[in-house]
Structures are given as C-alpha cells and as structure tokens.
Amino acid sequence: MAEDQKRNSTNGLLVASVGAVATLIILSLMFASYSTNGTGFEQKALWDWLDVLVFPVALAVGGFLYDRREKKRDQDREDKEQQREQFFAQERAQDIALQTYLDQMSVLMTQENLRKVATETPDSDIPKVAQARTLALLLELNPERKRRVLKLIAQLHLINRNECVVRLTNADLNDADLKEATLHDIDLSDADLRRANLTGADLKGTKLTKADLRKAILEEACLGEVDLAEADLRGANLSGADLSNAVNLTQEQVEKSLGDQTTMLPDKLEHPGSWVQSTNGQQSSK
C-alpha cells in the first residue's frame, strides 16, 4: 500500500512537472515574440508558438501515460502470478500434510494396533495421539480435503457410533464439502460443522449430539435415526431433508432452523409458520 501511494505521488509530480515546463516555455516564447527585434520572431504569433509546442508536449505526456499504463499492467501480471504461486504452494502444503497424516495413521493402525488398544486400554496415549493428529490436520485443510479425512477415518471404523476411537470433539469441519457423502452410524458429537455443505448427504444413524450445525446446508439430506440431542441448528437449512425418524429433535431446534413444506419432521413436531412454502407448493397453490 505504501509503495502504491509513493508511486501515485511520483506520477503526480511528473505530470505537474511536465505541465510546469510546458507553461514556462510558452511564456518565454510569448515574451520573446513581443520583445525581440530584427530576428523574425516578432512576426510569429502566439498561436504559431503553440502549434510548434503542441506536438512535442503531447508526445511527452502520451509517452508518460503509456509508460505508466504498461507499468501498471506489468504489476498486475506480477500480482496475479504471485497469487497463483501462493495458491499452488498452499495446495502442495496441504497435500504433504494429508500424506503425512496417512502415513502416521497407517503406523498407528498396523504397528500400534490402534483399534485394539482403544478398546482394551481406553487410557492409552495411542488413541489420544490419533485424535490430536486428526484435529490438528483438519485445521489446515480446505473444505474438499476435510471431506477426504472424514471419509477415511469413517472407512477405517475409527469414528463408529458405538465404538469411537478418534473423538471429533470441536473438530474443525466448518465449511466442509460433504455434499452427497454417505456417512452411516458414525460419531460426530460436538463437531464444528458450521456452514458445512451436507446437501443430499446420507447420515443415517449418525450421532450429532451437541454438534454445531449453525448455517449448515442440509437440503435433501437423509437424517434417519440421527441423534440431534442439543445440536445447534440455528440457521441450518433443512429444506427437503428427511428428519422423520430423527432422534431427540425438539420443536425449539426446528423453530431456529430454516426449512419448507418438503422438510419431513417426526410426527410429534410441527412445521414452523416462519418456514417458506416450497417452490412446488407455491406453484400448485396458484
């Protein structure tokens, strides 16, 4: 920012200098045209001198403006290239972090018998190490890579609902891209899922107790037998979602969420009056 201000100030001074020099030249020639005798200059009118000066002055100003435009264009190219390099550097760093995590988890699974130790020795440090590494990694990753990690530990049965090895308490899954993901019977208790995209996801039997789902997108999601006890659903989009068999869902939670008439709720709960009509419902009512 300071460099831009300095460059703009320099450009302004150059323009002012060109204008001042041109003015001085014109005034000098005007004076000479009126005071010089016997040289032929007295026969030159002011407009003659202006005509002589217009082209070089215009050329100088035009050259200056062109040079400034080219410098700005070069700077813009450099900025874009720098942003591009930073983007790819971040992508490489995340790929390395993910691969390192996979290697570490492989060691814990095969050499340290992670699942067995977690079952037989709950107080062992090995499950705690696995949890710490998982939570730390999620803080570094973009939404798409968060999906990969969650799918991986689910497939390795490390976050099973009834036998959870890696607890995802306060796990950074906000903004995670979980669109159309199939995650059955896993434990996401206390996870941070703010603004996560769960559109069309199949979360049948998943434990979401005390999960932070504020402004999460759950459109068309299958939430059968999902445990939503004390889950924060403020601003969560439940349009078209199937919660007909959801467990521990309260009317208060529903009132704080967003949905429409296509949202399927348990029989004991009602659609809030604040929920909008679905597009199909509006069309059929017209």
Image (cartoon, helix red, strand yellow):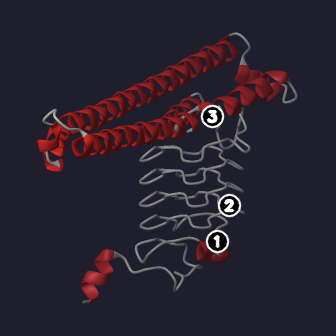
Q: Nearer the viewer, mark 3 or mark 1?
A: 3
Give the residue furthest to the top: 111
Q: CA distance from mark 2 to mark 1?
A: 8 Å
| Residue 107 coordinates in the image, percent (x, y) | 67, 12
Per the image, the residue denoted by label 3 is 138
Report helix, strand or loop for mark 3. helix
How busy is the neighbourhood of tag 3: few (under 14 within 10 Å), some, or many (20 plus)?
many
Q: Residue at x 75, y 29 (%)?
A: 132
Q: Residue at x 55, y 39 (%)?
A: 1
Residue occupied by mark 2: 231
* Residue in view at x 39 percent, y 42 percent: 20
Foreground residue among 20 and 246: 20
As measured in the structure, the alpha-carbon distance from the residue carrying label 3 to the one carrying label 2 is 21 Å
254 with respect to 21 (left or right): right
Residue appearing at x 28%, y 37% in the figure: 61
- What residue is disc 1 on? 253
Question: Is residue 261 depicted above or below 211 in this figure?
Answer: below
Residue at the outermost front position: 38
Of the pair 27 and 133, the residue shown nearer to us: 27
Which disc, if any, is residue 168? none
In the picture, measured across the screen, residue 115 lies left or right of residue 29, that is right
Q: How many labels were placed on the picture?
A: 3
Decide: is 233 above or below 285: above
Task: Measuring from the top left, give residue 284's x and y in whole percent.
Answer: 25, 84
